[in-house]
Image (spheres, rainbow, N blue to C red):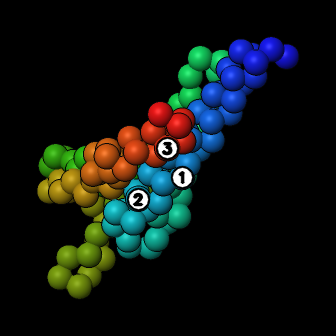
Amino acid sequence: MSRFQDAIEDMKRKRKQTMEEIATFVEAEAKQRAPVDTGDLRRRITHVTQHTDDESRAKIGTNLEYAPVIEEGSKPHKIKRNDGKPLKIKIDGKWVTVDEVNHPGTKAQPFLRPAIDENAGEIQERIRRGMGV
């Protein structure tokens, strides 16, 4: 292999290693920021990296269906009976079955976006160090 080709391969290796380091860092930051009730959200935050000859990408997140509502919040909405399953709620200490409920919405509790936004300088520094720039 030529020195030029060796240099290209070295840059690709550094790029992959740097992306993995950044993804691991952002994942850890998101886990620290995630609100904890059962701990399931925090445990299920993960990352994957993808690499081609031209670029590297990282995806950090979770496949939990309720994660976007925690991150972004929700507006007031109705929750209706689904698939014939009863909705049970507690009113005055007694469980009752209802056809629908007016949910007041939830306040956003961002954990993914701040893990990136609040660490932009650190991420840039890791790129500089990792790529030797």
In the rendered image, which residue does mark 1 sit on?
Answer: 24
Q: Secondary structure at mark 1?
A: helix
Find residue 6 and report its horizontal and vertical position in percent: 75, 22
Q: Is residue 61 visible?
A: no
Three-letter code for the amino acid on which mark 3 is drawn: Arg
Q: Nearer the viewer, residue 2 or 82?
A: 2
* Distance from Cα at disc 2 to Cα at disc 3: 19 Å
Q: Quadrant of residue 92?
A: bottom left
In the rendered image, which residue does mark 2 sit on?
Answer: 29
Find residue 101 and report its horizontal and vertical position in percent: 22, 56
Q: Nearer the viewer, residue 67 or 14?
A: 14
Q: Quadrant of residue 96?
A: bottom left
Three-letter code for the amino acid on which mark 1 is drawn: Thr
Q: Farthest right residue?
A: 1
Q: Secondary structure at mark 2?
A: helix
Residue 34 vertical position relative to residue 27 in the rendered view, above or below:
below
The earlier-in-sequence mark between 2 and 3 is 2
* Distance from Cα at disc 1 to Cα at disc 2: 9 Å
* Distance from Cα at disc 3 to Cα at disc 1: 16 Å
Find residue 44 and report its horizontal and vertical position in percent: 53, 58
In the rendered image, which residue does mark 3 sit on?
Answer: 129
Residue at the image point whose x is 85% and y is 16% from the top: 1
The earlier-in-sequence mark between 1 and 2 is 1
Find residue 123 and report its horizontal and vertical position in percent: 40, 45
Residue count near mark 1 (Cα–Cα under 10 Å), binned few <14, some 14–19, many ≥20: some
Q: Nearer the viewer, residue 116 or 9?
A: 9
Asked whether disc 2 touches disc 3, contact meaning CB atoms under 8 Å apart, the reply is no
